[in-house]
Amino acid sequence: MHAGTSDNDFSYARFDAALGDRFEVTAFGHDGAEHVVFLKLATLTRKPSPPNYEQFAALFVGPQAPDLAQGSYAIQSERFGVSEVFLVPVGRDAEQQMRYEACIVREAVGDGSSPHASDGFANER
């Protein structure tokens, strides 16, 4: 998290509201040139978490090139706004699109969010 970012910026509800959105990601290539990559927020998967915490994985898909190295990126969409997340490349899907995952674990006390899956198992959307 960076200065000016609240923990609620990383709530499941905020990511869920942006499911299917196209996100703009700015990256710098090996040559130092700036590249804009567009990623789609494809799925959210809840993970079992202790009380008062929520944990989920956000899966983004995008073009094969330019691919993004593991690291922190500012991502933005119209509905989501802007936040910095740590993206990890996790391979290609059946359509040969690159897949990137952001894993979120956060304390969810007093913010009205659903802190964990009621059955203790992952739920996919």
Image (tube, rainbow, N blue to C red):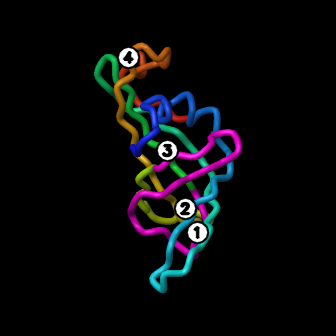
Q: Are marks 4 and 3 in contact (CB under 8 Å)?
A: no
Disc 2 crowd, CA 10 A, few/some/many (<14, 14-19, 20+) = few
Query: For the residues carrying marks 4 and 3, which lies nearer the camera in this image?
Result: 4
Name the residue rendered at 47%, 18% in the picture: 114
Report if residue 2 lies within the magenta region: no
Q: Earlier in the sequence, mark 4 or mark 2?
A: 2
Q: Which residues are magenta?
A: 61-84
Residue holding disc 4: 109
What residue type is disc 1 on?
A: Gln
Q: Are marks 4 and 2 in contact (CB under 8 Å)?
A: no
Report if residue 67 lies within the magenta region: yes
Q: Are marks 1 and 4 in contact (CB under 8 Å)?
A: no
Residue holding disc 3: 58
Q: Earlier in the sequence, mark 1 or mark 4?
A: 1
The circle drawn on residue 93 is 2
Residue 14 locus on image (x, y percent): 57, 32
Name the residue rendered at 41%, 16% in the picture: 118
What residue type is disc 2 on?
A: Asp
